Image (cartoon, helix red, strand yellow):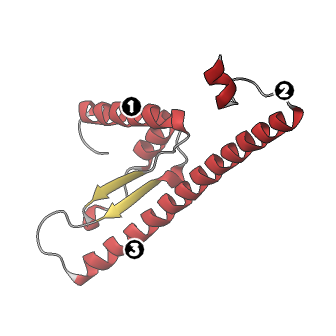
Amino acid sequence: LEGDPNTWNRMLYNLKYIRDAVSPRGAGLVVALMQEPDAGEPPPDRLAAMCNNLALNPRMVVTVAARLSGPHDAASRSAKDTALRTLGLVVHDQCAAYYARRAKAVSEKHAARQQAEQDRRCAPEINARAAIKL
């Protein structure tokens, strides 16, 4: 999130591309920011700008403090594990919400098919045998 504007714009463009690719299927987007443990908190203005540009809930941006190079000590491992647990909870919540929406859509589609069969006014696209005969 820190650095030259070209890198920032390229990152936002790539994230928008990913969001646009997954949103037609009803999937959400979770952003994990990897940084060194001693880097501190990410700049709040950059986080707010990213959330606004991507139409993200700020809870969907998780900072993972992990030592990317050098020795790995117990304190950095503990911080990394805590951050990964938080990321796991956010991803789990998003997966549960996605599959709940999908299950609801499938249930509604099944109920519509059942109702159409009961009414005996089944459309050809619903009834495979009728569609094949046409």
Q: Is residue 91 placed above or below 114 in the rendered structure?
A: below
Judge depth for marks 2 and 3 and give the one in front.
Answer: 2
Q: Is residue 64 placed above or below 10 in the rendered structure?
A: below
Name the residue that disc number 1 marks.
17
Q: Secondary structure at mark 2?
A: loop
Give the Cα separation between the discs numbered 1 and 2: 43 Å
**Residue 82's mark?**
3
Q: Secondary structure at mark 3?
A: helix
Give the Cα separation between the discs numbered 2 and 3: 57 Å
Judge depth for marks 1 and 3 and give the one in front.
Answer: 1
Which comes before the other along the chain, label 1 or label 2? 1
Give, as a three-letter code, the residue at label 2. Answer: Arg
Picture mark count: 3
- Percent across and percent down for residue 41 are 37, 59
Name the residue that disc number 2 marks.
121
Which comes before the other along the chain, label 1 or label 3? 1
Which comes before the other along the chain, label 2 or label 3? 3
Give the quadrant of the C terminus: top right
Residue lying at 38% horizontally and 37% vertically, measured from the top left: 15
The image quadrant that residue 74 belongs to is bottom left
The image quadrant that residue 78 belongs to is bottom left
Name the one closer to the observer, 105 or 116: 116
Q: Is residue 83 placed above or below 100 in the rendered structure?
A: below
Give the Cα separation between the discs numbered 1 and 3: 29 Å
- Percent across and percent down for residue 44 are 44, 49
- Percent across and percent down for residue 43 are 38, 50
Judge depth for marks 1 and 2 and give the one in front.
Answer: 2
The reply, left or right, for residue 87 in relation to residue 4 is: right
Residue lying at 34% horizontally and 54% vertically, measured from the top left: 33
